[in-house]
Amino acid sequence: MKDRKYTTVATENYPLLLGSSRYKPRQLFAVGTLPASTCVGIAMVGTRRPGASAQELCRRLVRSLKGTQAVVVSGLAQGIDSYCHEAALEEGLPTIAVLAQGLDAPIEGSRGLLAKRIVEAGGALVSEYEGDFESRKGTFVRRNRLISGLCQATVVVQSKAQGGALITADLCLKEQKTLYAIPGDYDSEVAAGPNSLLDRGLAKPVFTPESLSQVLGLPKQGGLSLEELDATGCHLSPEATVLFKKVNGFRKTFTELQSEFDFNTNALLTILTELEIAGLVHTEDNYQFHFNGAA
């Protein structure tokens, strides 16, 4: 990355939760744009040799975070890390790659191209190593400490029974942060790590990728989409679905709703109650209904 100038980050400007982390480094270097203080770091980690459907799984997990204040944080390794960075770029989410080397050290192949795309898209590369310092034994564990330190929570997507992702998981727990894992087939090698974490009660499960933002407790600007709501097991009635699709994103009075839909008063009140329970409508002024689902 010698074509991009890195900067030294002042301690008081360490991004996300790193400044208050037990893993706060003595120095930090960055290339690109660090996220705003209102953003929430979510670590998404896993094996370098994932299963056949892992890329689509990562896309669906990251897509669930769209519309939230999440920043996808990972380690730019092949496999799950790269899939999550790529998914964030596809969905327009900010992403931070934490490196186990200096920011002037070469990044070869597809990882180098991905690093360049992250910076160009408004994300960042960060490291506690200066200049062209090369990665070596021990630097990857220190990188994992930064990943955990930056983030509010860690999600283990796929991992063998032993691996770097489980080191990050352990670091997350030592900081008393919340750990999540994606359960998989009992006979799948790349599900052994997450399944073990869940078996031992160390991690919380994410049963459907579309529910990730809800499981993490991250509010969406504009609320949930109907697809995400359905994935959580909350199924709207056909009448509520028809109404919501038409007025999604608008503010309407009760009278306006009566004029636009052929529902009697009791039926309309029932639909509005259903949508309110689902979190898709609220009233702030005791007059207009604010339909706040994601487009």
Image: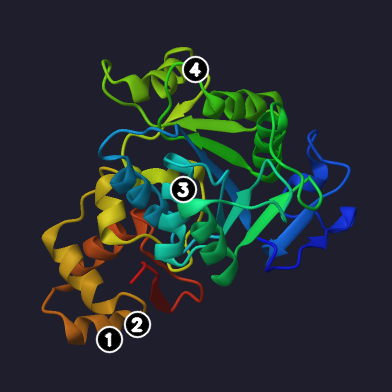
37 on left or right of 244? right
The quadrant holding residue 22 is: top right
The quarter of the image holding the N terminus is bottom right
Residue 190 horizontal/vertical position (percent): 36, 25
Q: Amino acid at mark 2?
A: Thr
Badge 4 is on which residue? Answer: 162
Q: What is the crowding at mark 3: few (fewer than 14 residues within 10 Å), some, or many (at least 20)?
A: many
Badge 3 is on which residue? Answer: 82
Q: Are marks 1 and 4 in contact (CB under 8 Å)?
A: no
| Above or below: residue 215 compared with residue 88 | above
Q: Secondary structure at mark 1?
A: helix
Is residue 122 visible to the viewer in this orientation of the structure?
A: no
Q: Residue at x 12, y 61 (%)?
A: 238
Q: Amino acid at mark 3?
A: Ser
Q: Residue at x 25, y 37 (%)?
A: 52
244 on left or right of 5? left
| Above or below: residue 235 compared with residue 52 | below
The quarter of the image holding the C terminus is bottom left
